Image (tube, rainbow, N blue to C red):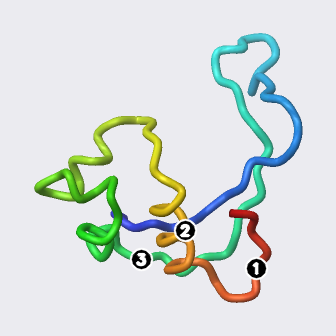
Amino acid sequence: CQKFTGISQVNEGSAYPQNPQDPIVWRRNVTFFHCYPKHVKLFHQKVDFLKSYEHWLDAFYMPVFEISKQDFIYIAQSILLPDQKIII
């Protein structure tokens, strides 16, 4: 798909095992917000975490990574449907 398709916010509460008998995978409850999917390449030279890569796809080879609050706000403002209450 190669698009930013959604944003979620972690809810109060602790992480819990997906399967209590086999606690390898842990989960947190989140609230998902309605978004307009937008292709990642539209953000390539506009957010810091993608600027350091020649090709935007290279940034996503890591399974988990952190982005700045500034980058998150820019992406959120670009893809969130209007009139949603999200705490940034």
Task: Name the residue nearer the viewer: 45 or 15.
Answer: 45
Give the number of the disc on residue 70: none
Q: Indicate the secondary structure of the residue bearing disc 2.
A: helix
In this rendering, would 44 be left or right of 70? left
Label 2 environment density (alpha carbons within 10 Å; few <14, some 14–19, many ≥20) = few
Amino acid type, callout 3: Lys
Residue 38, numbered label: 3
Q: Secondary structure at mark 3?
A: strand
Residue 70 at x, y percent in the picture? 49, 62
- SS of the residue under disc 1: loop
Residue 63 lies, with reference to residue 2, above or below; the image says above
Q: Quadrant of residue 48?
A: bottom left
Q: Is the Cβ of the residue at disc 2 closer than 8 Å to that at disc 1?
A: no
For this view, does 31 lie left or right of residue 47?
Answer: right
Q: CA distance from mark 3 to mark 2?
A: 15 Å
Q: Which residue is mark 2?
A: 73
Callout 1 amino acid: Gln
Q: CA distance from mark 2 to mark 1?
A: 14 Å
Kindly check if marks 1 and 3 are in contact, taking CB atoms under 8 A apart as contact.
no
Indicate the position of residue 56 as horizontal and vertical percent values. 22, 58
Pick whichever of labels 2 and 1 is earlier in the sequence. 2
Identify the mark nearer the N-term, 1 or 3. 3
What amino acid is labelled 2 in the image?
Ile
